[in-house]
Image (spheres, grey):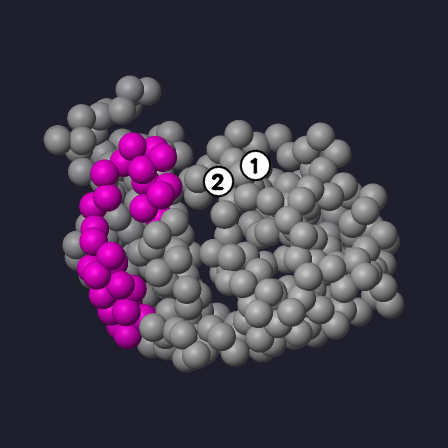
Amino acid sequence: MRTVYLNGDYLPETEARISIFDRGFLMADGVYEVTSVLGGKLIDFDGHAARLQRSLRELDIASPVSHADLLAIHRELVRLNGIDEGLVYLQITRGDPGDRDFVFPDPETTAPTVVLFTQAKPGLADSPVARTGIRVISIDDIRWGRRDIKTVQLLYPSMGKMMAKKAGADDAWMIEDGMVTEGTSNNAYIVKDNRIVTRALSADILHGITRAAVLRLAGEAQMEVEERSFGIDEARAADEAFITSASSFVMPVVEIDGVSLGDGTPGRVSRRLREIYLEECRRTAV
């Protein structure tokens, strides 16, 4: 049985309880982060912690835990649950005001709710899917306009994954005004003539922590990167494609809307980026 963290206490998962009036439950009024664990150590923790603070500020939620305490909680959960490879999920909501109201509760009397739990994922780094690549479909992007805030409003991304599953694919890329925004839970990239293309940062997409690390490593490896919007037709005509996220690292995409990219196998650029990213993760993990 897992040990989870709830508002200062480490508890068996069956004993953790949250009020039905918590605004995360009633209003999706909360933010989250997912940090990967390799070799029992945390990947890109500082980046995730910094983005968490930004998300909280954008929603005017007071930060309930310091950077040092957050790191200590993550490490303790990894230790208590014996996680070698896996994930730590963190969620902070505006808390439980004792009743339902659209108006934000007084932060002086309603403390945020803080939840963390682990997920064991043996073989996370050596995923067989990375050797074959994934297939994606395109769907309309009908989410709200502040995708740069990592909120718990994940209904449409979940629906997108189900659309992909129904179509016999692995994931979906979302399209707005003819241009790819991102995947359902990841940033999207194409490669053409050895040039990596990915959408520039804005409120339209999540500012991926893995994205930032991968683009930095690509630059250090003398790979050419172009941050701009690209359409789905351009994507289907690409030499290769890939996604990045905390849980998938760098994952090759081999098919878009039934159209194979290149020879239908993971491309050289995406394979090399996954390799150097994982090397960097293991070197810098905390």
Q: Which residue is mark 2?
A: 148
Q: Position of residue 65 (x, y in %)?
A: 21, 51
Q: Locate residue 178, reporting x and y percent.
A: 75, 34
Q: Is residue 202 above or below residue 4?
A: above
Q: Secondary structure at mark 2?
A: loop
In space, the residues marked 2 and 1 are separated at their CA atoms by 7 Å
| Span colored in magenta | 52-81
Label 2 vs 1, first from the N-terminus: 2
Q: Is residue 134 above or below residue 122?
A: above
Compared across the picture, whether 21 is left or right of 119 comes to left
Whether residue 49 appears in magenta in the rendering, the answer is no
User: Label 2: few (<14), some or many (≥20) within 10 Å?
Assistant: some
- Give, as a three-letter code, the residue at label 1: Asp
Q: Residue at x 54, y 38 (%)?
A: 202
In the image: residue 270, left or right of residue 84 = right
Residue 155 visible: no
Kindly identify the residue that appears in the image at 32 percent across and 46 percent down.
Answer: 53
Label of residue 204 in the image: 1
Taking the spot 53% from the left edge, 30% from the top edge, the residue there is: 145
Look at the image and tell me whether residue 267 can be seen: yes
**CB atoms of marks 2 and 1 within 8 Å:** yes
Query: Which residue is rendered at x = 28% and y = 74% of the image?
Result: 79
Residue 89, how many percent across, how many down?
Answer: 38, 56
Choose between 256 and 101: the one closer to the eye. 256
Looking at the rendered structure, the kind of residue marked 2 is: Asp
